[in-house]
Amino acid sequence: MDKLRITGGRPLEGAVRISGAKNAALPVMAATLLAPGVHTLRNVPRLRDTQTFARVLEILGAKIAVDGDLMTIDTQGVNAVEAPYDLVKTMRASIYVLAPLLARFGQSRVSLPGGCAWGPRPVNLHLAGLQAMGAKLEIEHGYIVGRGVKLKGASFGFDVVSVGATVQLMMAAVLAEGTTVLENVALEPDVTALGEVLLACGARIEGLGSRRLVIHGVAGLRPVDATIIPDRIEAATFAAAAAMTGGSIRLERVIPDHFEAALLKLEEAGCTVRRAADSVAVAGPARPRAVDVVTQPFPGFPTDMQAQMIAVCAVASGTSVIEDTIYLDRFTHVPELARLGANIELKGNVAVVKGVSRLSGAQVMATDLRASACLVIAALAAEGETVIDRIYHLDRGYEALETKLAALGATVQRVN
């Protein structure tokens, strides 16, 4: 099992090109099932999750070719409707194939999902929305099974904002008979990006970028040539690394508005941030200032940056209070940060972080994707050597992270 060995204490300097967004790529890959033919996707990040999803599509009958960040998906020959447990258990986003299979074939057998170890993250909103559209679904031996389904337009409101369920029902509605109205939908850039791809395929969607979508079902869709948006969480993670190390980084090929909430908090913490059309320059202070953070759905502060912000606050002057309102138990990184010398008190879904003047290297263990990133940027600021175990989590969501960090001057090595 691979580990990262990091010797900290050096400010990061230079430019880094941000990869395509995992959370945008996966729904778009699923959406290719809706339109038989050859799809061309550009700026696809080479990650464990995109590779896993590609394998799911291949098992369904798709043909996939990858050349760098260019992915070609031929869904003409898709003829299977089962997404097996062995793959779906490793990645929750595999459930995205459910609606396309129901819309195209009227049937499905998709394993209940797995993924990161924290949280209960039920799929009840996915199922309730599909059932409102006429899908009779059963849970059989851990599989979501649909038979003889004919999707019809319906009105459905989300009790809570859900990116995954919004994506699922958008894909269901574009080929459903009649008109679907979705209320209280997610506004994350990944959702809007999927909507723009569906429009390019010939879908009829009104209200994209708002909390209310009106989707008129069409008889068929055409293949698409699309470019995946940049990864706002990767960009914000590198910005946090600049804040922690007192470095100066230019983030290239980004959309600043997509991670503006994180940039504003880093400015509040003492960073200097300069925004351009497709780049952002972030210079960290000698020592960050304490800030308070409450995670919210987009455009609020993202839950996927909660762990990284706790790392920044761990070395800040003063006491920070960080509350996660999205996933209430997403704090497995806290005891690992304590191994590096952080002073954090956890009270339910609230972390009280009393900043210390320095962190010290230690051996720590990654527990999920964003916790892994948190430990990496903490290690970059810590004195001495830190060894981070179980970094396969990182490979799910950060492309060539150690290579990018090394190019910025970090002392980082992947070891087995």
Image (cartoon, grey):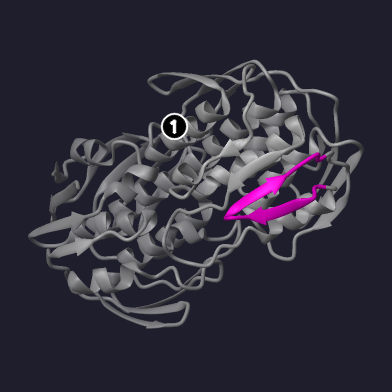
* Residue 95 left/right relative to 253: right
Q: State the residue position of label 1.
A: 253
Residue at (77% x, 49% y) in the render: 130
Label 1 sits on a secondary structure element that is loop
Q: Residue 302 location, x and y as percent? A: 51, 58
Location of residue 201 by image quarter? top right
Residue at (58% x, 64% y) in the render: 296
Q: Does residue 224 appear in this view?
A: yes
Q: Give the range drawn in magenta.
A: 135-149
168 within the magenta span: no
Residue at (38% x, 56% y) in the render: 370
136 within the magenta span: yes
In front of the other: 84 or 331: 84
Q: In this view, does 227 lie above or below 171?
A: above
Query: Dot 1: within a 10 Å radius of its alpha carbon, few (fewer than 14), some, or many (20 or more) residues?
Result: some
* Residue 73 left/right relative to 329: right
Q: Residue 181 location, x and y as percent? A: 86, 48
Looking at this view, name the residue that lies furthest to the left: 384
* Residue 360 left/right relative to 304: left
In front of the other: 120 or 293: 120
Give amino acid for label 1: Arg
Q: In this view, does 5 lie above or below 122?
A: above
Q: Does residue 267 appear in this view?
A: no
Quarter of the C terminus within the rendering: top left
Q: Residue 339 location, x and y as percent? A: 19, 72
Looking at this view, name the residue that lies furthest to the front: 141
Looking at this view, name the residue that lies furthest to the right: 178
